[in-house]
Image: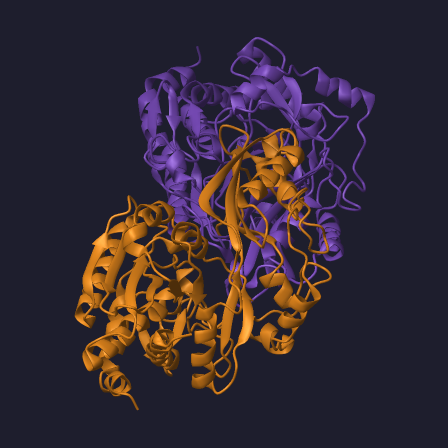
Chain colours: A purple, B orange
């Protein structure tokens, strides 16, 4: 066993305790009142990098939530790797569905529960832990390493593209390792070679200047809730296709080889349904579930509201109604063009008698694909095969990691997804958790991957 | 000027001060946490009746929110009149749209602002004030009077039908005067001869056992928000008719005479639109606005919600979605049968891949009609003509006052709507108010009406 592995075991309880400290910081980037917490998380990360033996670790301003940067660049002739992750987290509502409070993390049955445990604090922290083990035992790293951790991922990274563009030299590298990623199962590794893109908008519908009595005025004017329901219903066909004209323009049809590669990833429908608690799967006709979530675009309503939501009844005809919508995109949809199609659809299907306004959110990313035979992927494949005793599946991911496309554009490099999250870890939901076994396996995996990347390819 | 009118003027400021005290009690019947406030309002009313010189004034239990009863029965040979009103009020949200807090009433420009000022505390209190003026000056009332004020009107009066049925002797009368009513304008009186009925239900849609990440799972399962939007959209045709099979069964078509009577009530479309702040009127094709709100049934969504409602974006695929719906009914729809039609429609149009449950609320009332030539209406007509210097319009009301039908069934008497609310008083909405001029005109009107009812018809 290499010395760094002994070190990881010897300091195991300290690393868990640090993980708990990290999750305690309520760094919700989407809520302005948590801005100071996001800043605190950035400072925590920079200090943690320094403690690990990394150099020039610091918090850097972006104009929005900050980033934390660190480096170790004393391996001349070896590749330079940029490790990416994020220390901000999702909002926590509905709060009442958490078993223990989201920012009072707790270990139960080998799992650390708390907001951000899996997405992405655990996965992110384990990379620093791995570097510490290497530095404190060998006194050096096998490759040059830069680390960039951001605080805006969960609110769409509005300032990150400009930050990366402005710091091309600082961030210059041969390869990105993206810790915001996952495995197939506890016993089966996976390499993510595709991510969906994203675009988002909000619809606000207004009518009267005030809430009205539904007895006095019901029947005389368009109810904003009726208008919103009709508009939202127009986005899909009853059988689950997106009904927005132009939405599927540019979507790459799947080749038989791609379909075969996806079909080779095992899918247990009963287990999948049981895990999320649904009776029935439902989606675009003609595609499997993995195809629907990995390589087909979607339009989802993420929130919708208006009128009375309390106990009992209030016979109000509300003045306004709202909905938040996001689309997951695939190669080669253009996010701005998709938003244009949505706006055109809304104009065309706008119900009579109400005012409809549309606001685009900043989050905007095309889908991302990395070649399966990229040398970084091949190194990752070798390490995962060693660790799990079996070859990884080549998967796509339904979610979006817009940063990959940002790095490709500004640094000219691919990002290799190398993370240890699992699908059941309730990310973005109550009772999010991360397995301590994954936290520790990830540390070993990162140390081995850096060694592997130092070998001549 | 009769002595009672002098008395009303002499004690004017005390009555306003009492009105303010009454509105200060936050007697929201729909919210369980306000039950003690509803009780306090009942006690306030009973004490106020005693102070006015009424007898046997007391709070009576119903099994739910209480009623306040009072009487004066020393006019042998004269009719017995039952005055009805309610001291409970609507919820107050959205609280941020109130100029001054809903339960810190304030007089501005001759209007008393506060929740319940118009609906129904002001209209209700003025009847007691009128009785006090008669009793303190003449020492007697021209007719026998009973008063029944309830605390459940805004939550559907669940225990009132049983209470009335159980107290037929106590409440026995020749005629009900219903203070929960209004006038046409400040200068034009109206008699309400029809009310719409009501029935209500809630739709709850569930799918996954938890909120899911819309990237990971978007496309694989039915989104409860999509299902709800599709279901709600199916309730109406795009041009504004209710699309529920059987919904219009039994609806009385309007006779040419009825349409003419409605058309004779002046309607200023520009003023109507300006008053509620809408650009366009919209409703069932083939009917005027008064017809749409008075004699045509409606189905309105009063609330709808699910998923993320905060600032910014949360890419969640929520586990549940909800909607509250009420229907306004006209002669001769059966409220239970309408709910049956709605449930059948929901079963038929239930989107695939989700669980849909329907809960009926207790509020259930058929529409109500009182003959225009009923002696009570004729007495009211005479008093209003005197007071305003012109004949009243014969109107219907879009809202529902289920108690009228309860009195008709259990006491065998009609209710005459005799109230002084005006359409712009923001009832059920922020900044509800009542005009002090109406408060005072109503006092005079009630005193005169009791005198008129004592005259041989």
Residue A376 appearing in the image: no
Left or right? Give the position of A443 relative to B101.
Answer: right
Going 73% across and 62% down the picture, which residue do you hit? Answer: B286
Going 38% across and 63% down the picture, which residue do you hit? Answer: B176
| Residue A134 pos. (x, y %) | 44, 24
Quadrant of the snapshot with the N terminus of chain A: top left
User: Based on the displayed image, in which of its 4 quarters is residue A43 positioned?
Assistant: top left
Residue A113 appearing in the image: yes
| Residue A82 pos. (x, y %) | 56, 35
| Residue A210 pos. (x, y %) | 51, 66
| Residue B364 pos. (x, y %) | 48, 47
Q: Is residue B7 above or below residue B159?
A: below
Q: Nearer the viewer, residue B327 or B168?
A: B168
Q: Identify the residue at the far bottom of this view.
A: B1
Quadrant of the snapshot with the C terminus of chain A: top right
Q: Is residue B372 above or below residue B236?
A: below
Left or right? Give the position of A229 relative to A110.
Answer: right
Q: Nearer the viewer, residue A143 or A151?
A: A151
Number of labels in the image equals: 0
Q: Is residue A434 above or below residue B60?
A: above
Left or right? Give the position of A366 relative to A102.
Answer: right
Q: Nearer the viewer, residue B270 or A421?
A: B270
User: Based on the displayed image, in which of its 4 quarters is residue A191 positioned?
Assistant: top right
Q: Identify the residue at the far top of this view.
A: A389
């Amino acid at each position: 066993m290499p010395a760094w592995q002994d070190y990881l075991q010897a300091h195991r309880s300290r690393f868990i305790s640090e993980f708990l400290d990290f999750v305690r910081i309520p760094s919700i980037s989407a809520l302005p009142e948590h801005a100071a917490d996001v800043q605190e998380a950035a400072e925590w990360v920079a200090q943690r990098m320094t403690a690990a033996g990394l150099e020039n670790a610091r918090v850097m301003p972006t104009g929005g939530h900050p980033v934390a940067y660190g480096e170790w660049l004393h391996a001349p002739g070896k590749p330079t790797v940029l490790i990416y992750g994020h220390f901000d987290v999702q909002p926590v509502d509905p709060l009442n569905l958490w078993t223990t409070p989201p920012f009072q993390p707790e270990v139960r049955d080998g799992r650390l529960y708390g907001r951000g445990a899996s997405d992405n604090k655990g996965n992110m922290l384990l990379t620093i832990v791995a570097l510490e083990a290497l530095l404190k035992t060998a006194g050096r790293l096998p490759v040059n390493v830069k680390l960039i951790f951001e605080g805006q991922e969960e609110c769409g990274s509005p300032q990150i593209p400009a930050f990366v563009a402005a710091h091309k030299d600082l961030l210059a590298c041969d390869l990105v390792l993206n810790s915001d990623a996952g495995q197939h199962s506890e016993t089966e590794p996976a390499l993510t070679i595709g991510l969906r893109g994203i675009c988002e908008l909000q619809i606000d519908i207004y009518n009267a200047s005030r809430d009205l009595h539904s007895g006095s005025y019901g029947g005389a004017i368009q109810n904003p809730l009726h208008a919103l329901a009709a508009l939202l219903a127009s986005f899909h066909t009853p059988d689950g296709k997106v009904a927005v004209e132009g939405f599927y323009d540019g979507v790459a049809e799947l080749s038989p080889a791609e379909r075969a590669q996806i079909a080779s990833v095992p899918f247990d429908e009963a287990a999948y349904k049981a895990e999320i608690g649904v009776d029935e799967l439902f989606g675009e006709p003609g595609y499997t579930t993995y195809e629907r979530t990995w390589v087909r675009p979607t339009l989802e309503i993420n929130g919708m509201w208006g009128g009375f939501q309390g106990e009992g009844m209030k016979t109000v005809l509300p003045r306004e109604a709202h909905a938040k919508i996001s689309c997951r995109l695939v190669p080669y949809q253009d996010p701005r063009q998709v938003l244009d199609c949505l706006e055109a659809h809304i104009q065309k299907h706008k119900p009579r008698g109400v005012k409809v306004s549309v606001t685009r959110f900043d989050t905007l990313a095309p889908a991302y694909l990395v070649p399966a035979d990229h040398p970084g992927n091949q190194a990752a494949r070798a390490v995962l095969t060693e660790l799990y005793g079996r070859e990884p599946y080549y998967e796509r991911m339904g979610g979006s990691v817009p940063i990959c496309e940002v790095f490709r554009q500004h640094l000219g490099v691919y990002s290799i997804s190398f993370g240890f999250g699992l699908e059941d870890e309730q990310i973005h939901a109550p009772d999010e958790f991360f397995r301590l076994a994954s936290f520790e396996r990830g540390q070993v995996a990162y140390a081995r991957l850096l060694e592997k990347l130092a070998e001549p390819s």
